[in-house]
Image (spheres, grey):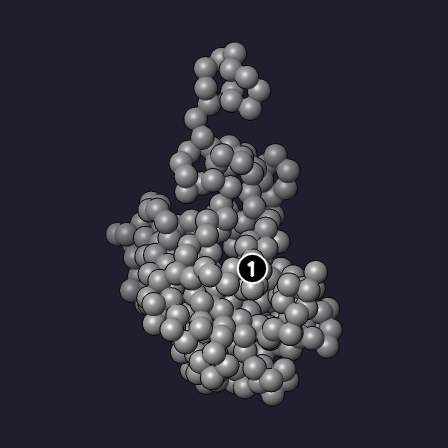
Amino acid sequence: MGRLNGKVAIVTGGAQGMGAATARLFAAEGARVVIGDVIEDKGAAVAAEIGGNARFRKLDVRSEQDWAAAVSTAIEAFGTVDILVNNAAVVHFTPIEMLDAGEAERVLAINVLGAMLGAKHVAPVMTKAGRGVIVNISSVDGLRGCNGLSVYSASKWAVRGLSKSLAMELGPRGIRVCSVHPGGVNTQMGNPMGLAGDALNKDYRRVPLQRIGEPEEIARASLFIASDEASYITGAELAVDGGWSAGYYQPMLPGAPDGLGA
């Protein structure tokens, strides 16, 4: 406990799923947290659950005005911004022939521009302090291609590239930037039908760990990067995907030892 004592974090998409899990974990580890989201009732509820070390601020990550207000909230309530977790995102499935330009622009604006604007608005505060960490949540689909996810994959590859470029630009100022790449995660986005047990994990049989991830497992990766334990890590990408990006598990021949068979 206490790995983020004295730190102040902004977590976008913090009303639910991985963002809420990250906000809760950061607070439990000693951070004071500003939760940003467009889902106001759920975001306010997460902040209320955490208590006095949390604030909620409505934040549409596409909005310069909202970003400026979120940073101001952090400074007014807690004095600074040490950590930014760019978690807010949307997924989009479509064959390329059915791509709608307006919808593609919406996905890219939330997933990519949102992270850019977040970095833009926290960089001056972090630069003044001579330290800071930006954690950009990408995806396993920022490490590989996936049919039907062209726009989403493009956005998550962009977040990966953005992270490396920002690491180069901001490193001399003492600011570290990394990307985290979740695989399937048991959230509303990753499990929209609310499946459980075998029904939930049956589509993950070819992932090496053969199950979906939990939001807290992704949050723990962000915690590590945000903590001083990762003080010499920047420009890195961390896959938290049950081995999905390593390849697909192939059952071996009948009679193979336990754990190697079908």
Horizontal side, residue 10 vs residue 24: left or right: left
Mark 1 crowdedness (10 Å alpha carbons): few <14, some 14-19, many ≥20: few
Which residue is the site of mark 1?
229
Name the spot of residue 234 as percent of width and height, x first.
Answer: 42, 62
Total of numbered circles in the picture? Answer: 1
Q: Can residue 72 be seen in this view?
A: yes
Name the spot of residue 65 as percent of width and height, x first.
Answer: 46, 85
Q: Is residue 73 above or below residue 37?
A: below
Q: Is residue 80 above or below residue 251?
A: below
Q: Can residue 88 be seen in this view?
A: no
Which of 96 and 248 lies nearest the eye of the viewer? 248
Horizontal side, residue 11 vs residue 245: left or right: right
Name the spot of residue 247 as percent of width and height, x first.
Answer: 40, 36
Which of 48 and 180 lies nearest the eye of the viewer? 180
Residue sitting at x 73%, y 77%: 52
> Residue type at mark 1?
Glu
